[in-house]
């Protein structure tokens, strides 16, 4: 198994450094040929979305498409693909990816409520995200 860092994932998508993008593509092709999995950690996805939004000004639609393609590619694996997929599905509509991933993790771990003062999360998950219990 190989793990990718945020900078490698961003290079793969943005291709703003041709040499680095090519090296990442070679790693992916080699992994595919040799049936080696590439793990993408949730923290890397959070950073990647942040970089794509804030540095490269990518649209939510483009980022969502990138995440969906990544999840659908057999070479890539995730520690908990169900949690990642849940966060991506919500992110397509609205919300901060990091927050959505955190809520998905809380649900996975059977938290009955998610205590937060985040009004946007409360709107997305009105019966789950609360600021009083």
Image (cartoon, helix red, strand yellow):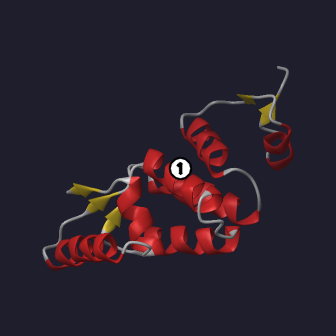
Which residue, given by chain and number where applicable, does mark 1 sit on?
A: 46
Q: Is residue 35 above or below residue 44?
A: below
Say if residue 124 shows up in the picture: yes
Where's the C terminus, which quadrant? top right
Question: Taking 53 as reference, is 124 left or right?
Answer: right
Q: How many marks?
A: 1
Q: Quadrant of residue 117?
A: top right
Is 29 displayed left or right of 126 in the figure? left
Which residue is rendered at x = 22% and y = 76% of the image? 26
- Secondary structure state at the residue bearing disc 1: helix
**Image x and y of residue 9, in percent:** 40, 63
Residue at 56%, 40% in the rendered image? 105
Query: Is any atom of residue 126 visible in this view?
Result: no
Q: Which quadrant of the view contains residue 127? A: top right
In the image: residue 121, left or right of residue 34: right
Q: Is residue 1 left or right of residue 105?
A: left
Q: Residue furthest top?
A: 133
**Which residue sits at x=50%, y=56%?**
48
């Amino acid at each position: 198994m190989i793990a990718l860092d945020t900078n490698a994932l961003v290079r793969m998508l943005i291709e703003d450094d041709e040499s680095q993008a090519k090296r990442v593509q070679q790693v992916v092709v080699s992994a595919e040929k040799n049936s080696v999995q590439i793990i993408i950690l949730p923290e890397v996805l959070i950073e990647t979305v942040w970089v794509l939004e804030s540095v490269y000004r990518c649209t939510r639609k483009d980022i969502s498409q990138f995440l969906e393609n990544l999840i659908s590619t057999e070479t890539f694996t995730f520690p908990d693909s169900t949690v990642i997929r849940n966060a991506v599905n919500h992110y397509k509509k609205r919300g901060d990816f990091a927050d959505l991933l955190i809520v998905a993790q809380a649900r996975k771990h059977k938290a009955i409520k998610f205590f937060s003062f985040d009004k946007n999360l409360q709107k997305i998950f009105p019966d789950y995200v609360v600021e009083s219990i």
